[in-house]
Image (cartoon, rainbow, N blue to C red):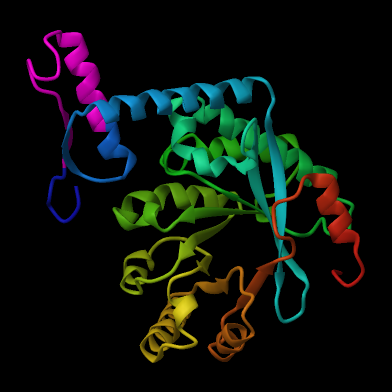
Amino acid sequence: MAGGTLAATAGIALYPTHDADSGELIARANAALDAVSAKGETGFRFYTGELELQASERHDRTASLFRAFQDGKFEMHYRVEVECRTQRPEVIRCVPTWRHPERGVVPVNDYQPLVAEAGMLDKFFDWVLAVVCRQKASWRDREWGYLPLALEIAAPQLLDSRLAPRIARALSEYELEGREFELHFSKDMLQADPESLAPMLLELKAHGLQLTVDGFSVGAQLLENWRSLPLDNLSLEDGILSSAPKNHADRLLLTALISLAHGIGLKVNASNIDSEELHGLLRRLQCDGIRRYRSDSALPPRKLEGLLRRRGLF
């Protein structure tokens, strides 16, 4: 519910058009419901034979994901973000990956809804925590050991009251501190009801964790709704970043967005910046961090360590 309006989603199968058996009707209505829900939409949809095929394929992918997890086919890869002005590393992004039999190594985030459907959200999150904490502890004495590790938190985990205690236990087990990690949340997770998230975010902040709203592109008006939340950073990506160098109106909007974010105490970072023109514009607008990835794709730990040892990074 938002602004006093109740939104509903429904899948519809008709008797006897789609079947005479009640069990089959329910299954087909669920297939229609899944089709609506998969797109993040509200409203209704009638069952068609095509939807049943799609539901079957989705079930096969979910089962495949579950088997991959059971067989140890998940790996944690990493990407280094460097500050464009100095080329110094700023943060290491954690990228859970699935060694897929057909697509090769792909980010598990591409399959995030399937993780929940496979009933493995908690197991997957515990695996991520254990892997990144163990890796961070192993890098404690390396020259890049001071770099924070950034990991994304999915909506179900952010809304789970067990999140902060689970993270705290993992940090304690490996003798780590919260300030060594950044938790990144999608802007979509904060738009519906930011006030309800405040207690959870405050608990995460109490453990020293840095909180970042990720993937931000447009919507400066949202910052007014977020000013009471204990956030640290705003990460600009895509949207007006692409058009601001050429479009005067978007450039004005970007200027206002950065100024407003600074006004409510947020640092503003821009990620994956390769254009010199955009880099210059962001410098003039006093963007706090202007970053790009140091490699084209996420790397397993040994390859990442080789990258970090190269001259000039530290």
How many numbered marks have been drawn onto this rendered protein structure?
Answer: 0
Q: Quadrant of the C terminus?
A: bottom right
Where is residue 279? Give x, y as percent: 61, 83
Please say if 136 is above or below 273.
above
Where is residue 173? Give x, y as percent: 73, 34
Q: Residue at x 90, y 60 (%)?
A: 309
Q: On the image, which quarter does residue 224 sit in?
A: bottom left
Residue 169 visible, this angle: no
Q: On the image, which quarter does residue 99 sit in?
A: top right
Residue 310 shown left or right of residue 277 in the figure: right
Q: Residue at x 53, y 88 (%)?
A: 285
Residue 17 visible, this angle: yes
Depth order, front residue of 107/51: 51
Residue 160 shown left or right of residue 97 in the figure: left
Q: On the image, which quarter does residue 144 sit in?
A: bottom right
Please say if 103 is above or below 249.
above
11 in the magenta segment: yes
Where is residue 68? Give x, y as percent: 62, 25
Q: Which residues are magenta?
A: 8-33
Depth order, front residue of 294/224: 294
47 in the magenta segment: no
Depth order, front residue of 97/234: 97
Q: Residue at x 48, y 53 (%)?
A: 185
Residue 85 shown left or right of residue 184 in the figure: right
Where is residue 54? Give x, y as percent: 35, 30
Residue 81 shown left or right of residue 288 in the figure: right
Depth order, front residue of 217/36: 36
